[in-house]
Amino acid sequence: MGRERGARALQDLQEHPCSARKLAERAAYSTIIQKSVPLPLPESRLVCLVTDLTMAIAAERTSQVAINYKDQDPVSFARMNARVQALLQAYAAANCHDWRSFARWSDAGYLRHLLHECDDFELMLICWKPGQTSRVHNHADSHCWLAVLAGEVQETQYRPVVPKAEAEAEPHAPAPLSGASPPELSALLLSEAEGSSGCSSLSSSGESNASFAAAQMQAQFSKLQEQRREQAERQAEEQEKGQAEVLCCDDLRLVRTQTRCVQVGGVAYINDGLALHCVGCPAAAECPNAIASTGTNTTSTAANSGSKGPVAGQGSCSGRKGGRAAAAMSSSGGLTALFGRRVNGTIGSGCADALAYPAAADGDMATANGANGWACTLHLYAPPIRRVKAYEAGGHVTECTPGFYSRHVLRP
Ligand SMILES: N[C@@H](CS(=O)O)C(=O)O
């Protein structure tokens, strides 16, 4: 009897996602509810987001499709990508503030705050001060979406350079970072859907992408391959002329292919299938008034000006707004950071596996605003990232396990 009621409640929840009542019902049938304080109120947008993301991803998993960028069927990925992007974008654009109680910044490097983790995905809040960036890294076959909640971030993409001898032996081969992958395809579809404005936002309007048929995707994929061939040729030319920025680590040479900015409200898909990359918050000098107005605008240049800060307290959000947050520490002591590059250089290079991280100072508990140019991003990794490769200029390619600064549980 109890089981039946539970199943009915969950089915109901799936059909009518995310209302406070439904969430309360769901809580009644959840098995383990681990709480760290303070949790947002059950009806908070962040909790709803976790519930909706869970369903969007589970919907693909139940059809026996492996959820990762390498194995997932393109149509399944396109469907999931559209849903996930629409959910993240709705949250980012709603100008919610419930994330702020989990946000901490540090002078030592960007901080990762784990908000939710399950077998399918992890949701991470990342706090950046101006000038802080991640190392060039991969995502170890995980999908990764990024939504900007405050400020602005830049993503710089890199592609391994094909050694000249190899390129001559096979002149039309694209850089062999990875083979054909669903995300590549989907990202192409999304960028095509946005038109050829030159902006590199990957914000999605939502469900429309899900309707792409497999045949159309195949045609687009051929186009993508052609573009990659052209890009490889352009890179070879740039290298000849010595124009391309090249990063060397171990025997690998990486060439920078593009930089794109994502502003507040914007959503991007980032993945090894597209490129290796690093993400960072532009230094104040590069990016005056870094907080942009709510929306999905992005630019492909480093500089951004004339933007406005977010308006506090607006939007359709409920739940806590700011307030004193508790940073629940990880079981191993908590203060772990990951493949971030420390701006002050005091912590050294290489991956920071379980490296003790200085606690955020009280001053770092202030929230991001237009004046300080700090940024905050929401990252969704599906499945959770277990190990990544980090590429250090003049250094080594290092494997490391991502850690986090604080851990929370957002399940209702
Ligand atoms: N993947 C990085 C952030 S970004 O560079 O995408 C991290 O989780 O620390």
Image (cartoon, rainbow, N blue to C red):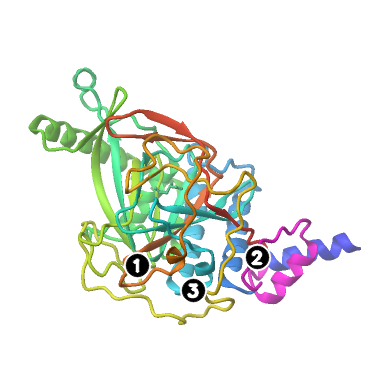
Residue at mark 1: C-beta within 8 A of ligand 1:
no
What kind of residue is marked 2? Val
Quadrant of the rendered structure where residue 14 is? bottom right
Disc 1: which residue = 296
Q: Residue at x 26, y 57 (%)?
A: 283
Residue 371 coordinates in the image, percent (x, y): 30, 72
Secondary structure state at the residue bearing disc 3? loop
Q: Is residue 83 above or below residue 188?
A: below
What kind of residue is marked 3? Cys
Secondary structure state at the residue bearing disc 1? loop
- Magenta residues (range): 15-42
Residue 34 coordinates in the image, percent (x, y): 72, 58
Q: Nearer the viewer, mark 1 or mark 2?
A: 2
Side of 173 relative to 217 (left or right): left
Residue 282 coordinates in the image, percent (x, y): 28, 57
Q: Nearer the viewer, mark 3 or mark 1?
A: 3
Residue 315 coordinates in the image, percent (x, y): 47, 80
Q: CA distance from mark 3 to mark 1?
A: 15 Å
Q: Is residue 385 above or below residue 172?
A: below
Disc 2: which residue = 37
- Structural crowding at the residue carrying mark 1, measured as other residues with C-alpha within 10 Å and reported as few (<14), some (14–19) or many (≥20): many
Disc 3: which residue = 96
Magenta stretch encompasses residue 228? no
What kind of residue is marked 1? Thr
Q: Nearer the viewer, mark 3 or mark 2?
A: 2
User: Quadrant location of the C terminus?
Assistant: bottom right
Q: Is residue 135 above or below residue 151?
A: above
- Structural crowding at the residue carrying mark 3, measured as other residues with C-alpha within 10 Å and reported as few (<14), some (14–19) or many (≥20): many
Magenta stretch encompasses residue 17? yes
Give the farthest residue toward the right.
1
Residue at mark 2: C-beta within 8 A of ligand 1:
no
Secondary structure state at the residue bearing disc 2? loop
